[in-house]
Image (cartoon, rainbow, N blue to C red):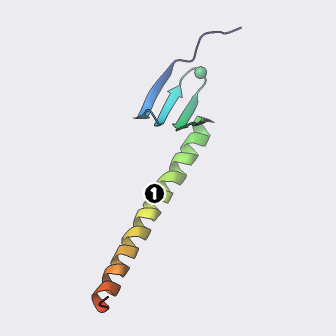
Amino acid sequence: MNTTPCKRIVLSGSDGCRVSYCEDCRVAEIEVGALSLRLEVHAFNTLADVLQEAAAKLAAFNAARADYEREVGSQHVH
Ligand SMILES: [Zn+2]
């Protein structure tokens, strides 16, 4: 029985929002508050791609909305 604790390295973040990696298990662990999600590397990479795309689209969405509101704001006096 292997009782050696996992040797995890922190990839990014700090307390409250952190990603660490265990080379022995080849598992990435995402910790957000009380939630912790363990993912094998392939699943982690997929999630990273999805999050990156979502973040980019959210930024584009917010930028487009800011432009729209600026246009509307310049046409109407409240
Ligand atoms: Zn481990």
Instruction: Kindly identify the residue that appears in the image at 56 percent across and 33 percent down.
Output: 29
Percent position (x, y) of residue 26? 58, 27
Percent position (x, y) of residue 74? 28, 87
Residue at image mark 1? 55
Q: Nearer the viewer, residue 24 or 55?
A: 55
Determine whether, in the image, residue 4 is placed left or right of residue 19. right
Q: Amino acid at mark 1?
A: Ala
Instruction: Kindly identify the residue that appears in the image at 46 percent across and 24 percent down.
Output: 9
Determine whether, in the image, residue 63 is placed left or right of residue 30. left
Q: Residue most toward the front? A: 78
Q: Secondary structure at mark 1?
A: helix
Percent position (x, y) of residue 45? 54, 43
Quarter of image, res 24 = top right
> Badge 1 local density, few (<14 within 10 Å), some, or many (20+)?
few
Quarter of image, res 2 = top right
**Which quadrant: the N terminus?**
top right
Q: Can you tell me which quadrant of the image ligand 1 is in? A: top right
Instruction: Kindly identify the residue that appears in the image at 40 percent across and 75 percent down.
Output: 65
Quarter of image, res 23 = top right
* Labels in figure, total: 1
Q: Nearer the viewer, residue 5 or 69?
A: 69
